[in-house]
Image (cartoon, rainbow, N blue to C red):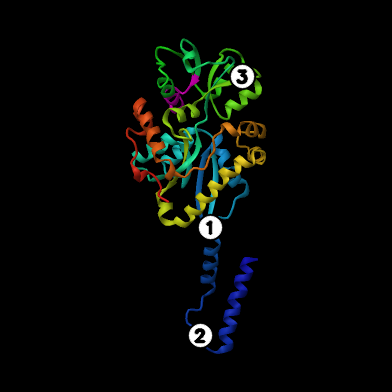
Amino acid sequence: MKRTFIILLALLLIFTVACTGTEEKGTLETGEIEEVHKEQLEKQIVKFYFPAGVPSLTVAKLVKENPNIDENIAIEYELQSTPDLLASKVLKEEADIAIVPSNLAAQLYNKGIPYKLAGTSVWGTLYLVGTEDLNSIDDLRGKEITSFGKNLTPDLVFKYVMSQNSLDVNKDIAINYLSAASEVGPQFISGKTNLALLSEPQTTNILMKKEDARILIDFNEEWSRITGHENGYPQASLIIKTDLIDSHRNFVEKFLEVYEDSLKWIKENPELAGEYMEELEFGMNKAIVVNGIDRMNVYPFKIQDSLEVYDKYYQVLLDFAPDVIGGQIPDEEFYLER
């Protein structure tokens, strides 16, 4: 159909020239017309990579509804099945936009890989779940907690909060580290442990399956109480490649507005968000979204309001394990100015 149109257009131009008896300067040949038409149809592809879990929830509306942000740019959304695969994509600069752990964002910057941090996608979603009440955090003294990811960021957040409550995790608490976060829940459900460190959406999944389970510590709330930062700590962040920012600034600004709106939408429409997650097969069912939305800590995320928050978070990580952020706290050039 399109080629027929092009041929007809070319014949029309030839007929017009023949009838007038003159040759118009700049008249396009058939091949040139076809090339122009092809260029109009082609769009620049922007690749947006993100991990499973709560970060994928923040993207579900965009993936499902695919809003037209710029007529010349198409976004390809792609869920990355493992953290290692996501890290590989951004390390190779294959992603134009990505949601990554906030510590990985700092690592990229410190390696000179050209991304800027545009805002917070997910605030802290780490919880201590148990079957008995705690009167205070000090009641954990002498207890054994089943956890995951030794010296990774959830573990470092846990250690920091314990240290600010006068508990030394090397002396006062026994930590049983499992090889993967996915192993902690089954241990807790089976009764092999009665204290488990879990993140969302695993936390909600466990609370729905085990009637006597309850939240004992909300580490985002504790972080907020300790630091005075209202939203807690920035668990996952949105990063954008510098080339995309420089070459398509208007698109970037419009995209960020649409993404911010989607964060607000999730809080207001958890049932529909849950349906989107199921339809997209992003690893979270509707019941988990509806029951866990208040623990998933998805807030408006403008970076201008969070520079001190990131600085504190990175300082804590630097103090405990410098390598997790690449050895130093990023400077202000790391953040996208808007």
Residue 296 visible in the snapshot? yes
Residue drawn at point x = 55 percent, y = 59 percent = 71
Question: Whole-percent x and y of residue 26?
Answer: 48, 79
First in residue order: circle 1 vs circle 2? 2
**Three-letter amino acid code at disc 1?**
Asp
Number of residue marks: 3
Using the rendered view, name the quadrant where residue 164 is placed: top left
Circle number at residue 23:
2
Question: Which label lies toward us, 3 or 2?
Answer: 3
The CA span between labels 1 and 2 is 38 Å
First in residue order: circle 3 vs circle 2? 2
Residue drawn at point x = 38 percent, y = 39 percent = 108
Residue extent of the magenta highlight: 147-158
Residue 76 visible in the snapshot? no
The CA span between labels 3 and 2 is 84 Å
Q: Is residue 38 magenta?
A: no
**Closer to the camera in the image, 272 or 225:** 225
Question: Which label lies toward us, 3 or 1?
Answer: 3
Question: Which label lies toward us, 1 or 2?
Answer: 1
Q: Which residue is mark 1?
A: 70
Indicate whether 162 appears above or below 78. above
At numbered mark 2, what does the secondary structure look like: helix, strand or loop? loop
Left or right of residue 26: residue 168: left
Indicate whether 186 appears above or below 331. above
Question: Whole-percent x and y of residue 127?
Answer: 53, 24
**Closer to the camera in the image, 104 or 41:** 104
Q: Which residue is mark 3?
A: 213
